[in-house]
Image (cartoon, helix red, strand yellow):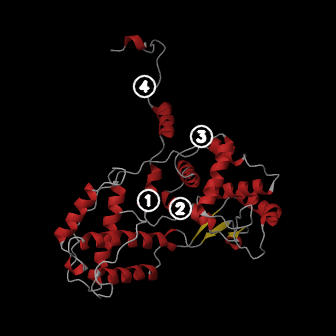
Amino acid sequence: MGRTERRRPVGDPSDPRGFEVLIRRYLEWLAVRGQSASTQRNSRSYLGSFAQWCAERGVEQPGQVTRSLVERYQRWIFHHRTESGKPLSAVTQHGRLQRLKAFFAWLAKERYLQYNPASELELPKLPPKLPVDGFTVEEVETILATPDVSTAVGLRDRALLETLYSTGIRRKEVVGLELYDVDFDRGIVVVRRGKGERTRVVPVGERALLWVRRYLEEARPELVVHPDESALFITGQGQRFSGDGLGHRVRRVLRDSGVRLRSRGVCHLFRHTMATQMLEGGADIRYIQEMLGHANLETTQVYTKVSIHKLKEIHAATHPGRLLSSTEEAPDSDSRG
């Protein structure tokens, strides 16, 4: 079931009602609708796996798929084990079946099928998303002050970090920023073709703009190699960052800062930190949704689950039984039953 496996064609690849032709048409439909490359890639992989599973059971056309067969596939996914012996996570199972439901819904809408065998398929319940342990204000300031801004690379790193913290945009979106995407007069950044290929405009703070301007005036001319390079942030070799390259660079700064490393992607931590701190400062969640570029408010609501540190502060400040009275003593460990 791995994505890197080479998939064998299922049935007659020229059969207009076969899996091969209809999956190709569906993927083309996704591309025309502007779905992201990752959505198209996952759909190709998941639907290909399902088609092969069906072929092994003598089914080579979507029109031959029944509701009971789809339910069998769901049970097979649930019991499937990877090469390391681990089951597929609920998120992975949900993703595979969600793509399957979307595919059959499209087939029925386009009249390739008389009925949708996956219409009543119940997706696995996803585990609740827990808040990410982001940075404190003090930790962010420590990280921002880490790069040596007397060097071109250090000045670039400071401008990059300030942009991440101020805007909360995704790593991929930072990589895609062009020189003309920053409007210093209006104090905004245009994020073109973000997640879901959507374009949005987000505000950027004065401090971040100050460092970006310094970077453009003092550091970028030293780093750029080709005059026609349009990327806002470039590597020491004068090229646009890759997503992994940007992540490695930010993680290196974080490591040098002495702030404890988290397992989550460091660029995402700045995004989470920005959203959490703005919400705790009184920002309406709908504005945070717009800044983060979330299509659904439910995705943003994870940030309303305040961290345990904030909860402890509120508890300590408001709970009437939070402190020992002058006549009470803390129980000795030896006296505990």
Question: Which amino acid lies under the numbered mark 1 shown in the image of this protein?
Answer: Thr
Q: Residue 34: x, y in percent?
A: 47, 78
Relative vertical location of residue 32 with respect to residue 259 in this rendering, above or below: below
Pointer 4: what residue? 321
Q: Earlier in the sequence, mark 2 or mark 3?
A: 3
Q: CA distance from mark 3 to mark 1?
A: 27 Å
Q: Residue 96: x, y in percent?
A: 34, 65
Q: Is residue 325 visible?
A: yes
User: What kind of element bears circle 3?
Assistant: loop
Q: Earlier in the sequence, mark 4 or mark 1?
A: 1
Pointer 3: what residue? 260
**Residue 221 vs residue 12: left or right?**
right
Q: At 64% from the left edge and 53% from the top edge, which residue is drawn? A: 250
Question: Which amino acid lies under the numbered mark 3 shown in the image of this protein?
Answer: Arg
Q: CA distance from mark 2 to mark 3?
A: 25 Å
Question: Which amino acid lies under the numbered mark 2 shown in the image of this protein?
Answer: Leu
Q: CA distance from mark 4 to mark 3?
A: 33 Å
Q: CA distance from mark 2 to mark 1?
A: 10 Å
Pointer 2: what residue? 292
Q: Which mark is residue 299?
A: 1
Work out whether residue 187 or residue 11 is closer to the camera in this orientation and state it. 11
Q: Neighbour class for label 4 at 10 Å: few (<14), some, many (≥20)?
A: few
Q: Residue 16: x, y in percent?
A: 30, 88
Q: Quadrant of residue 181?
A: bottom right
User: What kind of element bears circle 1?
Assistant: helix
Q: CA distance from mark 4 to mark 2?
A: 39 Å
Q: Earlier in the sequence, mark 2 or mark 1?
A: 2
**Residue 98 vs residue 73: left or right?**
right
